[in-house]
Image: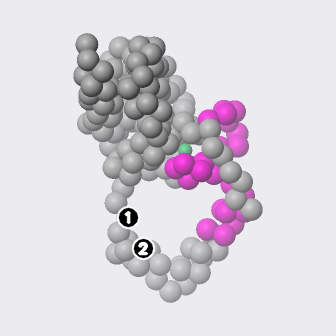
């Protein structure tokens, strides 16, 4: 198999799993769960999903970003094992954080300026910005997607997008 072909295969597999995630019903469906099984990926538990559904990280459709990340990690691992120079250079250029963020942008609710103005009439504007201030002081957020860390749950990576990058906003 030619080197170019391997690179193309890798890219098309990334596209394929990303579009499966996108086409999934909100939070995953049978097709998506089957794909997770095929890739030997551990899905989120029901309680993790419920916690995400109740979080401020709203999605309108699609599988949760962290599950897509887990699948993409398997894809990369599989191709890296081929130990092909051209492919390896392609793999090293792959930016997981931006790939996942890009996916999240596609499944999150559209927040146009109209919504902001609608919600921010007069007194509620002050309350709104005060709320943001308080929230800023209290939460630890994911650097990649902005999800707040749920204090009552123990986990190392962001539950929403799977990033390791937490930062404290103080
Ligand atoms: Zn995140």
Taking the spot 57% from the left edge, 39% from the top edge, the residue there is 163
139 inside magenta stretch = yes
Q: Quadrant of the N terminus?
A: top left
Occupied quadrant, residue 24: top left
Residue 72 relative to residue 138: left or right: left
Image spot of residue 112 (x, y percent): 35, 69
Image spot of residue 50 (x, y percent): 50, 36
Q: Which residues are magenta?
A: 132-157
Residue 23 relative to residue 156: left or right: left
Taking the spot 60% from the left edge, 48% from the top edge, the residue there is 142
Residue 93 relative to residue 32: left or right: right
The reply to whether discs 2 and 1 touch (Cβ–Cβ < 8 Å) is yes
Image spot of residue 36 (x, y percent): 39, 20
Q: Main secondary structure of the magenta part?
A: loop
Q: Which mark is residue 116?
A: 2
Secondary element at image label 2: helix
Taking the spot 27% from the left edge, 25% from the top edge, the residue there is 4
> Which residue lies under the disc numbered 1?
111
Where is ligand 1, by quadrant?
A: top right
Q: Quadrant of the C terminus?
A: bottom right
Secondary element at image label 1: loop
Q: Earlier in the sequence, mark 2 or mark 1?
A: 1
122 inside magenta stretch = no
Out of 63 and 157, give the one closest to the viewer: 157
Tag 1: Cα neighbours inside 10 Å, few (<14), some, or many (≥20)? few
């Amino acid at each position: 198999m030619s080197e170019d072909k391997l690179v193309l295969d890798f890219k098309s597999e990334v596209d394929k799993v990303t579009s499966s995630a996108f086409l999934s019903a909100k939070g995953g469906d049978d097709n998506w769960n089957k794909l997770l099984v095929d890739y030997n990926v551990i899905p989120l538990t029901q309680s993790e999903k419920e916690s995400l559904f109740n979080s401020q990280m709203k999605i309108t459709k699609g599988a949760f970003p962290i599950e897509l990340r887990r699948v993409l990690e398997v894809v990369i691992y599989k191709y890296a094992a081929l130990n092909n120079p051209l492919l390896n250079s392609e793999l090293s250029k792959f930016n997981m954080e931006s790939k996942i963020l890009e996916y999240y942008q596609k499944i999150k609710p559209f927040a146009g300026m109209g919504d902001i103005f609608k919600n921010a009439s007069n007194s509620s504007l002050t309350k709104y910005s005060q709320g943001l201030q308080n929230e800023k002081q209290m939460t630890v957020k994911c650097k990649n997607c902005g999800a707040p860390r749920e204090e009552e749950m123990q986990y190392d990576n962001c539950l929403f997008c799977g990033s390791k990058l937490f930062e404290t906003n103080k």
